[in-house]
Image (cartoon, grey):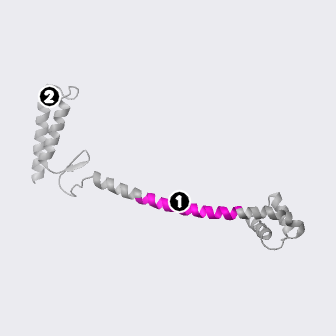
Amino acid sequence: MDIEQLLEQYYEGRTSAGDEAMLRRFFTTGDVPNHLRMYKPLFAYFENVRNKSDGTSKNNKRIILWLSGVAACAAIFVGTFFYTSQTKKCPASGNYVMIDGRCYTDAATIRSITIKTLHEVSEGDAFFPDDNTLNIINIVENQLKEFDFLLDE
């Protein structure tokens, strides 16, 4: 295709990316006829801007890729640390109780935590009236004895 026809299509907005690349190549390399030299600075400018932006975007992509990898590693490390530090492993089989996200298998520890919690709750009149507090503690004690029986098996 003739360069003058390509220029006409370029200014009418009917060129493809390949046509524009051909125009940039023509005006930045080789001899340009005298009557077309006025277009040379325009296409040379576009070529320089394109080359500068390609180098910058490649460097930015490398930096972003590197930082993304570092952030992913840090997230995995922090997540693994919190998961292993917050959860106490429960046995795969057998009886256990979860209290506040921790696993307990010792009946004496379970009993003491339960009694302590019931006493804290029973101190307020809104939850347990005074005359029923001992009755509730006795019910819980009986259930804990049954739990002891299950753990002993």
User: Where residue 94 sits in the image (x, y, percent)?
Assistant: 17, 55
Query: Which image quarter is the N terminus in?
Result: bottom right
Visible residue check, residue 147: no
Q: Is residue 56 in the magenta section?
A: yes
Task: Tell me where the magenta segment starts and ends, as one range.
Answer: 49-73
Q: Residue at x 17, y 26 (%)?
A: 129
Describe the element under mark 2 as helix, strand or loop. helix
Give the image quarter of residue 46. bottom right
Give the image quarter of residue 93. bottom left
Q: Amino acid at mark 1?
A: Ile
Crowd band around label 2 with a 10 angstrom C-alpha radius: few (<14), some (14–19), many (20+): few
Position of 42 relative to 104 (above/below)? below
Question: Is residue 82 toward the left or the right of residue 153 in the image?
Answer: right
In the picture of the structure, the residue carrying the numbered disc 2 is 132
Please tell me whether mark 1 or mark 2 is closer to you in this view.
1
Q: Residue at x 79, y 67 (%)?
A: 23
Crowd band around label 1 with a 10 angstrom C-alpha radius: few (<14), some (14–19), many (20+): few
User: Where residue 86 sits in the image (x, y, percent)?
Assistant: 28, 51
User: Where residue 75 sits in the image (x, y, percent)?
Assistant: 40, 56
Q: Amino acid at mark 2?
A: Asn
Marker disc for residue 23 = none
Position of 85 relative to 47 (above/below)? above
User: Where residue 37 sits in the image (x, y, percent)?
Assistant: 85, 66
Q: Residue at x 23, y 26 (%)?
A: 126
126 or 58: which is nearer to us? 58
Query: Which image quarter is the C terminus in?
Result: bottom left
In the picture of the structure, the residue carrying the numbered disc 1 is 64
**Could you tell which of marks 1 and 2 lies nearer the N-terminus?**
1
Give the image quarter of residue 29. bottom right
